[in-house]
Amino acid sequence: MASVSDLLVEPEFKMLKLIAGENGLYRQISGINVIESVDLIPFCRPNEIIITTGIHLDSDSKQLEELIEKAFEKRVAGFIVNTGPYISKIPSSTIQFANDKQIPIFEMAWKYRIADLLKSTFQFLSVKQQSAHQQQSDEKLLYNLIFHYDEFQFSIESLEKRGFPNGSELGIITCTTPTSSKNNIHRYESIILYEFQNRYNYFLALKQHNQLIFLINRQEVKTAHIPFSKTVEKIYEKVTEMNGQEDLIIGMGNFSTYLGDIAKSYKESLTVIHLVEQHKNPFIQKYKEIGAYKLLMNVSDQSIIKAFQQDMLGPLYMYDHLHNTDFVHFLRIFLAEEGSTIRISKKLFIHRNTVNYKIKKIEALLDANLNHTFTRTNLNMALMIEDILSQKNNLLENSTKRQVF
């Protein structure tokens, strides 16, 4: 189904000017309807775009406000106001309502015909419906490439038809919301798609549980002069504007010309996501940027790193378990903030005396001096091992939840 944001990028809708409700551009569109009075609101359907000229509304604009408020209750996708002799200006109170409720309102000048808009919208939705069938086929292809490559029979031509010539360097980008978030990735889908369409000539997309997964051709980048990090920053900024906080994580796996590595690239993207969430560090975006984690993940005898992690952090975990404290979490913050008492105090909203107390307590429990660089290096390494072990457990759990097309 098309979203309201799609209207902004289509040339046939250039007469529409968004004036309110920008954070509601993710809303899906199922149709378009002309409503000229509050009495006709019962004929609205969810996800419709509503058009009005105001021909049957009072000139004091109160009925326009009521019309939009009642339409919002019907869960419409947005509103188009044909400004002219009947509605000269959209009142500020209506704009405020639309911004608060995240319902997009567009202004269309009187010189443009509603009949033409209706025709363009019907054609637009028809094309989107046809592309939805193609999208299902694309999703099935990408799903099998990631999760069932060994038993999946397909031809190279099926990828070439979608803009992925044989020998292309292919990789996976995964987008998801943090485990603590109440929002689903669907809420930010239109924002992500808009920015990726601006960056990449072609891509395949797959929605899997709370993930939006993309197959990218490294050579098919429209904005190769702009780093991937800038695209991610734009997406994060828009999500923050919509939600008031960073509520999205994006991770990129490595690229390879071997199709069998697509599943590996997907796992690498999940590793990035896991590490970003653990460390609250949105600046890690690519698997190739995770540094020492790669070394630890490739240690053949995992019992060695498990023993090291237990030696370094075991007493702290035991104390937290017995006394319901949070010293392991505090240690993470301590290391991330390089031991700065002021920064730790601000981040955790605790007094500096409490910070100093916790530092001394950890030193006593671990029999270590947290001021020593070597000690901090070892503790960082132990926490990195914990992240890796936790990430492997998450992958194991997720593997049992996969749905088959």
Image (cartoon, grey):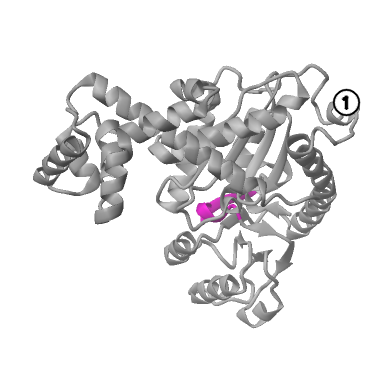
- Which three-letter amino acid code belongs to the residue tagged 1? Ile
Q: Considering depth in this image, is 150 or 113 the residue closer to the camera?
A: 150
Q: Residue furthest bottom?
A: 39
- Residue 360 falls left or right of residue 212: left
Q: Considering depth in this image, is 29 or 209 the residue closer to the camera?
A: 209
> At 33% across and 32% down in the image, what residue appears?
311
Percent x, y for residue 332?
30, 37
- Secondary-structure class at tag 1: helix
Percent x, y for residue 340?
18, 32
Q: Is residue 140 above or below residue 116?
A: above
Percent x, y for residue 57?
58, 76
Q: Which residue bears the numbered disc 1? A: 156
Percent x, y for residue 187?
57, 53
- Residue 88 falls left or right of residue 200: left
> At 83% across and 48% down in the image, what residue appears?
127
Span of residues in magenta: 15-26
Label 1, residues with CA under 10 Å away: few <14, some 14-19, many ≥20: few
Q: Quadrant of the N terminus?
A: bottom right
Q: Is residue 295 visible?
A: yes
